[in-house]
Amino acid sequence: MGSRVGELLNGDWGATVNNLFNLPETIEKVMFPSRSHENHENRGVSSIPVDILDTPKDYIFFMDVPGLSKSEIQVTIEDENTLVIRSNGKRKRQDGEDEGCKYLRLERRVPQKLLRKFRLPENANVSVITAKCENGVLTVVVEKNPPPPKSKTVEVAIA
């Protein structure tokens, strides 16, 4: 009986510690759940990792998009609060394909189709979004709406 209690405590303690370490990830999933894995239409689509920075004024998304130019990437808002980042992922091979030239080796990865979706929090201002692509990094900035004014308490003298 004593060893059984020890196993239960160890199991519960392990689960508790595990939940504590996963807390930021859990918060991130609640605020920015990525739904790209839920859709069957997205098979074969690359799920490029993203970093999301929460600042006092905005949310900033950072994604590595090597080999893609800004003209090959689309950033849109769907369903009023879903940030969608996509690319068709076609590799251009014009360089070195002149007459008499051929590739001896093609090792660089072809940019894959990219589709990531993020449900934005209620305080995201979807009308003020900027995006830039520099040095293979896509940066998307979504401004936050200002917080609602705090209600003031006014003391009224009773006559």
Image (cartoon, rainbow, N blue to C red):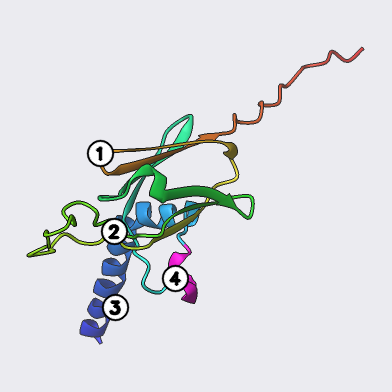
Q: Which mark is residue 42?
A: 4
* Amino acid type shown at disc 3: Leu
| Label 3: element kind | helix
* Amino acid type shown at disc 1: Asn
Picture quarter with the C terminus: top right
Q: Which residue is mark 3?
A: 8
Residue 116 position by quadrant: bottom left
| Label 4: element kind | helix
Q: Which residue is mark 2?
A: 91
Picture quarter with the N terminus: bottom left
* Amino acid type shown at disc 2: Arg
Per the picture, the main secondary structure of the magenta-coloured stretch is helix
Q: Is residue 40 magenta?
A: yes
Q: Nearer the viewer, residue 84 or 8?
A: 84
| Label 2: element kind | loop
Q: CA distance from mark 4 to mark 1?
A: 27 Å
Of callouts 4 and 1, the N-terminal one: 4
Question: Which region of the structure is painted magenta?
Answer: 35-41
Density class for disc 4 (Cα within 10 Å; few <14, some 14-19, many ≥20) is some
Query: Residue 27 placed where, x, y %?
Result: 43, 53
Q: Which mark is residue 135?
A: 1
